[in-house]
Image (spheres, rainbow, N blue to C red):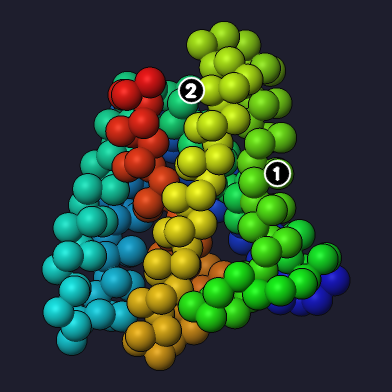
Amino acid sequence: MSQELTKRILSSVIIVAIAFFFIIKGSFFYIFFLLVFFFITSFEWYKMTKNKNYFLLGLIFLIVSFLSAFLLRNIYLDDFVLVILICISTDIGGFVFGKIFKGPKLTKISPNKTYSGMIGSFFLSIISSLFYVNYYDLVYWTDDVILIAVILISSISQIGDLTVSYFKRKSKIKNTGKIIPGHGGLLDRIDGMLFAIPFAFILFNFL
């Protein structure tokens, strides 16, 4: 195992553990957590797009996304955890399957993305979500509904990843920052969630 991959795994475990601590804790702790993440991602977005005419649009989107995270957690905690689980599984599945099976590239926007990685993203997010729903006996999630929801949320998460990759290419940078060892910036790590959470908030209210 390479040193870079080791740093990536360790930093992922630490971030996920910290995130779930604040999510479950709720109250002031969760608000503090969201504010810290918001200011860091906003700063990274500013550095990347400060001379671009779409900076303000992106900042507004960040505000909407973090507001959705606040509301979704406070209204549907179990479902919010499910969304985070789907996004994490999407990232892991894409990374692992892409590394193992490789194959044709998905898009020029992000050269590391492959069709095998995309399939892995869907596969792992479906498996982990079904386990979560059944383990916690969330009876309002039937198998057909959870399957549709997972595919939709995972798809939006992957689109979010590609969208941020597109803006990074326009800015001619590899990472949005250096705060997370093995990953780069915080925006690099939560790009999919930033898109998936507002979408899930609308979806769950509709369902």
Q: Tell me which residue sits at (65%, 75%) in the image.
A: 105
What's under tag 1, amino acid-wise?
A: Leu
- Return the x and y of residue 178 as percentages of the image width and height: 48, 77
Q: Quadrant of residue 131?
A: top right
Q: Tell me which residue sits at (54%, 17%) in the image.
A: 141
Can residue 32 be seen? no
The disc placed on residue 124 is: 1
What's under tag 2, amino acid-wise?
A: Asp
- Return the x and y of residue 58 as percentages of the image width and height: 23, 65
Q: Residues within 10 Å of mark 2 (few under 14, many from 20)?
A: some
Q: CB of mark 1 within 8 Å of CB of mark 2?
A: no
Label 1: element kind: helix
Left or right of 94? Residue 107 is: left
Q: Tell me which residue sits at (71%, 44%) in the image.
A: 123
Q: Give whichever of 155, 21 is nearer the camera.
A: 155
Quadrant of the drawing holding the C terminus: top left
Can residue 115 be seen? yes
Q: Quadrant of residue 143?
A: top right
Is the residue 144 above or below the residue 52 in the image? Answer: above
The disc placed on residue 148 is: none
Left or right of 132? Residue 54 is: left
Q: Which residue is mark 2?
A: 78
Q: CA distance from mark 1 to mark 2?
A: 19 Å
Q: Tell me which residue sits at (64%, 41%) in the image.
A: 125
Quadrant of the drawing holding the N terminus: bottom right
- Return the x and y of residue 185 as percentages of the image width and height: 45, 71
- Return the x and y of residue 99 as percentages of the image width and height: 77, 68
Q: Give whichever of 62, 204 is nearer the camera.
A: 204
In front: label 1 or label 2: 1
